[in-house]
Amino acid sequence: MIRAPIPPTFEAFRDAARALLARHAAPEDVFWEDVVEGQGVLFDTARPALPAPAARAPSSPAPRVPAAFMSLANAAACHRDPGRFALLYRALFRLTHGEPYLLDVAADPDVARLRALEQAVRRDVHKMHAFVRFRRVEDAGGGERYVAWYRPDHRIVRLAAPFFERRFPSMAWSILTPDESAHWDGAELRYGPGLPRDAAPREDELEELFRTYYRAIYNPARVNLRAMRAEMPAKHWSTLPETSVMSELVRDAASRVDAMQAGRSGAASAAAAYVPGARELPVLREAAASCRACALCERATQTVFGEGPAGAALMLVGEQPGDEEDLCGRPFVGPAGRVLDEALSGASLSRGGIYVTNAVKHFKWEPRGERRLHAKPVGPEIQACRAWLQAEVEAVRPRVIVCLGATAARSFLGGRFSITQSRGQVFKTPWAEAWMATYHPAALLRMPDEAARAAARAHFQADLVKAAGLVAGGALGSG
């Protein structure tokens, strides 16, 4: 058995592996040991030490090693797995003894394990690039230096440090970790021993500047605590100034989203020029009849305004009128309306007590022979009509709003809204205590087969039952 005690670096493994290959040492005959500064190694005299490489005969050229293996080994050698060097040498021996295409066999156990080690190390390097925070210190001569302390999962300082050299070439800095330290003076990158946490400064004036910056870029609409904890492990929090304001930002996220949505809903709408100041439904309905805020009015028979009582606890918002609605001037009286009425009955809701409207008040259609086929309204048309919808919400003041289809949901939220991802979820918003979205009844009629239709109807029915529960409970959490 050959004992191979080496420092835990890729360079040490490379040199030792060359010597072992020159001796034709089989992987099972080599015992690898990490030698860490200040620590001894086990079994000091139990095994012969690594031999020096023998002189190679001219007729025996050095084995060719694929560049891909060198890149893989450079990362895997930084992993803390105590068996990594044995694994690397076994793969190297196989590559140079009859298996030159070993790395192409992804299912091979040695290759799969090495790839896993490499991936873990690359991920750790990425986190170090993201989470290192420098603090300013003054040296004895009055100069300044920026110092950071970081605790990586693996021995990655030499992989990660060149990034900071490129990123901050004119700044003198040091990165301290428990294993090793990196120091840049503007001309040379040097490495030294590891240092404890108290070797680095705790706080400086840059901390508050960074917290201010983080508050400014924080997007409350994208809060995902599970992903945040996974991407920003708790062990790094003590060195990240932004974590001191994280609880404040998460706590206030809901109110900030409400403010963002309220601002978005108040964006310029061409119909605003036609909306009267009064917020009585009869006044609004009469004014809407002469709206010319977009080109849809040119081809539609008439404006189709919402109907239902002022003060209704539940408001349903669809996309736009259909052919039958355009002819008679009332919302949801065609085939989709009949599907809606049936589902409302199944949810113990009375159509007479609900306010029903559409995001767009004119029928958009395309000719197909003698028929008029529905055409989906586009963003500018939805935006043009938004002032009417906002006025209806203000006049009715519903406790619960249910949007039927993505177009209706986007008329409130703007941008992209996915019914598939967010159907049935209940949100507290500036427009109503409870806001949710579900399928449009017309979508149920267009399902490709009976099984899909039945499943969609069941979801639609369940969402209306949830809405009924919210109305009855009068609270966001009751549904």
Image (tube, grey):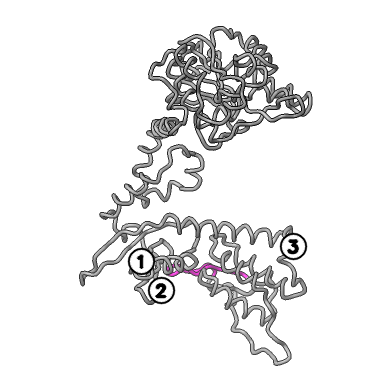
- Count of numbered circles in the view: 3
For numbered disc 1, what is the local secondary structure? strand
Comes first in the chain, label 2 or label 1: 1
Question: Spatial distance from mark 2 to mark 3, Cα to Cα?
Answer: 38 Å
The numbered mark, 2 or 3, whose residue comes first in the sequence reads 3
- Quarter-of-image position of residue 405: top right
Q: Circle 1 sits on which residue?
A: 174
Mark 2 = which residue?
189
Q: Which is more toward the observer, 206 or 233?
A: 206
Residue plotted at (26% across, 67% down): 144
Is residue 327 on the magenta stretch? no
Q: Is residue 353 above or below residue 160?
A: above
In percent of width and height, residue 88 lies at: 63, 67
The answer to which of marks 3 and 1 sits earlier in the sequence is 3
Which sits in the foreground, 221 or 25? 221
Q: Residue at x 50, y 66 (%)?
A: 159
